[in-house]
Image (spheres, rainbow, N blue to C red):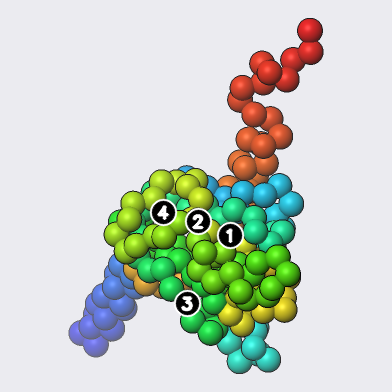
Amino acid sequence: MRKSNRIISILLIIIFATSLSHNPAHAKHLDFLTEIKFPVDHIKSHFYDDWKEKRGSGNRLHLGLDVRAPKGSKIVSIADGEINTVSYSPLSGYYIAIDHMNGWLSLYVHLDDDIIGNDNAGGKKAAFAKDFKKGDFVRRGEVIGFVGNSGNAEGTVPHLHLEIKYLGEPQDVYKYVLQSWENYLKAKLFPKNTMSLLIY
């Protein structure tokens, strides 16, 4: 009888411990995602749920969301925050990261580096909306850069690789980005101030 009591106690402890562990995206700041702004300001943006698609000949998983849009389309901050990183790497190309000061960080990758008639000659002036520095404050919806295909995206359709992390872990945020896209479309197609659209 004691043995069965001990087994039951161990099972209860395991169940209790398991209930305490949770996916970071189910944390108290989950409501942050319901308020995000769509990251590209262009009506011809296009995306689908490509979270964890195999990339690089199947050697790695895609831990973000690609938003295709015309080259040079405005990229905006999904929420208020501070600039965490403004940089370049051969894989990511030009990229910028924003710390939203609540455990969430958004990363915007493959920004534009082209100028008309000269591929890759634009550098950081073509990639970023201004000369951002670490610690600069940005507002939700503020233009931070421009869609391109720098880094290992060279030769692909221009797109923004958006990655959103919670406590350093990339999160599957497709449904929240989809909702932000639907909100963006409503605002573009049915603006609140419609008085100027009336015909008398």
Q: Of the two numbered discs 4 and 2 on the same chain, state the one appearing first in sequence.
A: 4
Indicate which disc, 1 or 4, sits on the residue closer to the N terminus. Answer: 4
Q: Nearer the viewer, residue 70 or 12?
A: 70
Amino acid carrying label 4: it is Leu
Q: Nearer the viewer, residue 88 or 6?
A: 88
Upstream in sequence: badge 4 or badge 3: 4
Front of the two marks 4 and 2: 2
Three-letter amino acid code of the residue under disc 1: Phe
Q: Visible in this render: residue 166?
A: no
Please state if 29 lies on the left or on the right of 147 as rendered.
Answer: left
Q: Can you tell which mark lies on residue 129? A: 2
- Using the rendered view, name the quadrant where residue 100 is placed: bottom left
- Secondary structure, mark 2, is loop
Up/down of 80 relative to 190, above or below: below
**Residue 87 point in image, percent of width and height:** 43, 73
**Which residue is pictured at 70% across the width and 55% down the height?**
45
Q: Which residue is mark 4?
A: 30
- Identify the residue under disc 3: 88
List the residue tagged with mark 1: 146
